[in-house]
């Protein structure tokens, strides 16, 4: 999220009265007084200060000592760190999806080689899907042909049934003819 997006998400939180933009990481007494800050809310984990301004090592140690710190509970999967880890884990999927949407590697600040590698993988996947579809179609046609063959040539198939009917008709006609010839005394 950009800073602006973070500020907007906080403004829509029902427990937030006011958002102070560009606030420092280490809060001074003057800053707290200037903005009339009654409480600072954050999870209780100690956060180190790389600027060196917080002498205790925890940026909130002084605020905690003043009694102006309210602990919030962390929700698994919602912290910024967890979001970043999930994004990094799905980095290639993210790039692939956005390339398919029409963004360029340059738009996403993706290195040239990484963009080309993912585009190549996308092309390979497309060929694989096309070939799979083609093979599936031919297997389906082969199954249809096999069923058609069996329907025609099996014991109860159309061809054998037709031959049996014809043979029965021929047999009946021959039998009738032989009976007629016998009556006429020709046999």
Image (spheres, grey):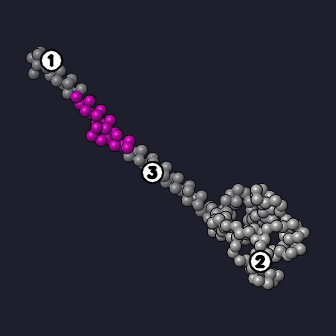
Q: Which residue is drawn at 47% across and 50% down?
A: 138
Q: How many marks?
A: 3
Q: Earlier in the sequence, mark 2 or mark 3?
A: 2
Q: In this view, does 143 lie above or below 131?
A: above
Q: What element carries label 2?
A: helix
Is residue 88 in the magenta section?
Answer: no
Q: Where is residue 64 in the image (x, y as percent from the top left)?
A: 76, 75
Q: Mark 1, residues whose alpha carbon is within 10 Å: few (<14), some, or many (≥20)?
A: few
Q: Identify the disc placed on residue 109.
A: none
Q: Which of marks 3 and 1 is nearer the N terminus?
A: 3
The quadrant of the rendering that contains the C terminus is top left
Q: Name the residue under label 3.
A: 139
The quadrant of the rendering that contains the N terminus is bottom right
Considering depth in this image, is 112 or 67 the residue closer to the camera?
67
Give the spatial CA distance, label 3 vs label 1.
56 Å
Q: What element carries label 1?
A: helix
Q: Which residue is drawn at 83% across and 62% down?
A: 19
Q: Nearer the viewer, mark 3 or mark 1?
A: 3
Magenta residues (range):
147-168
Prevailing secondary structure class for the magenta stretch in the rendered image: helix
Residue 69 visible in the displayed image: yes
User: In the visual, does 59 lie left or right of 144?
Assistant: right
User: In the visual, does 33 lie left or right of 122?
Assistant: right
User: In the visual, does 76 lie left or right of 55?
Assistant: left
Q: Is mark 3 on a helix, strand or loop?
A: helix
Give the spatial CA distance, label 2 vs label 3.
74 Å
Q: Name the residue under label 1.
A: 180
Q: Identify the disc placed on residue 65.
A: 2
């Amino acid at each position: 999220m950009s800073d602006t997006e973070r500020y907007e998400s906080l403004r829509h939180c029902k427990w937030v009265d006011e958002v102070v933009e560009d606030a420092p990481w280490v809060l001074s007494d003057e800053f707290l007084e200037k903005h009339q800050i009654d409480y600072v809310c954050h999870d209780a984990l100690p956060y180190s200060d790389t600027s060196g301004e917080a002498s205790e090592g925890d940026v909130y140690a002084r605020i905690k000592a003043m009694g102006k710190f309210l602990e919030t509970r962390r929700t698994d999967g919602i912290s910024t760190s967890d979001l970043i880890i999930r994004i990094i884990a799905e980095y290639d999927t993210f790039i692939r999806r956005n390339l398919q949407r029409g963004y360029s590697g340059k738009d996403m600040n993706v290195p040239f080689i990484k963009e080309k590698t993912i585009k190549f993988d996308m092309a390979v996947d497309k060929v694989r899907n096309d070939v799979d579809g083609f093979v599936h179609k031919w297997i389906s046609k082969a199954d249809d042909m096999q069923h058609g063959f069996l329907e025609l040539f099996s014991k109860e198939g159309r061809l054998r049934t037709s031959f049996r009917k014809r043979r029965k008709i021929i047999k009946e006609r021959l039998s009738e003819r032989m009976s007629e010839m016998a009556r006429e005394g020709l046999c």
